[in-house]
């Protein structure tokens, strides 16, 4: 993986569920990483739609263990929900996160 491609610093966050006593759920930082944020186009978008109906982009980053679809990616003021985590060829070199950006 070429380092120049990873030009966006993102924060991976995980959900911390509140207690039974009425505490609200919150998000905490899991990791800070350099990544590439790419919108999906053409055939790639069509193929991704076969797996997840609302995929809007792909975040590519170096491999980081423990990243799961229940997490989210924060880039500046933008927040992306992780729909799918792909470890190409199971080589533990990079992660491809299929994400959607909720409309507010």
Image: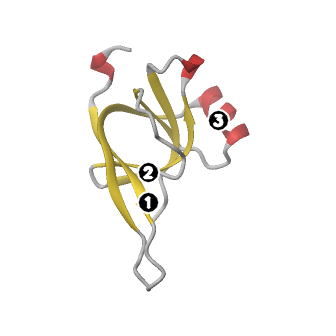
4 in relation to 17, above or below:
above
Where residue 9 appears, as percent x and y from the top left, is 26, 37
Q: Give the residue at x 44% y 23%.
A: 94
| Tag 1 near tag 2, CB within 8 Å | yes
**Would you call the spot at circle 2 few (<14 residues within 10 Å), some (14-19), or many (20 or more)?**
many
Q: Which mark identifies residue 48? A: 3
* Secondary structure at numbered mark 1: strand
- Which residue is labeled 2 in the image? 72
- Which residue is labeled 1 in the image? 15
* Secondary structure at numbered mark 3: helix
Q: Give the residue at x 42% y 71%.
A: 25
What quarter of the picture does the N terminus occupy?
Answer: top left
| Tag 1 near tag 3, CB within 8 Å | no
Q: Is residue 22 left or right of residue 35?
A: right
Where residue 89 appears, as percent x and y from the top left, is 59, 17
Structural distance between the alpha carbons of marks 1 and 3: 25 Å
* Secondary structure at numbered mark 2: strand
Q: Is residue 9 left or right of residue 64?
A: left
Where residue 101 appears, as percent x and y from the top left, is 47, 52
> Which residue, as the protein is rendered here, is positioned at the far top?
2
Indicate which disc, 3 or 2, sits on the residue closer to the N terminus: 3
Q: Give the residue at x 67% y 44%.
A: 52
Indicate which disc, 1 or 3, sits on the residue closer to the N terminus: 1
Q: Give the residue at x 44% y 85%.
A: 22
């Amino acid at each position: 993986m070429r380092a120049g491609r990873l030009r966006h610093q993102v924060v991976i966050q995980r959900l911390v569920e509140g207690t039974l006593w009425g505490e609200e759920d919150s998000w905490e930082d899991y990791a800070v990483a350099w990544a590439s944020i790419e919108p999906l186009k053409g055939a790639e978008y069509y193929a991704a739609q076969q797996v997840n109906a609302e995929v809007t982009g792909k975040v590519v980053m170096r491999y980081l263990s423990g990243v799961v679809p229940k997490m989210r990616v924060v880039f500046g003021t933008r927040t992306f929900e992780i729909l799918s985590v792909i470890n190409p060829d199971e080589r533990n070199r990079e992660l491809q996160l299929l994400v959607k950006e909720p409309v507010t």
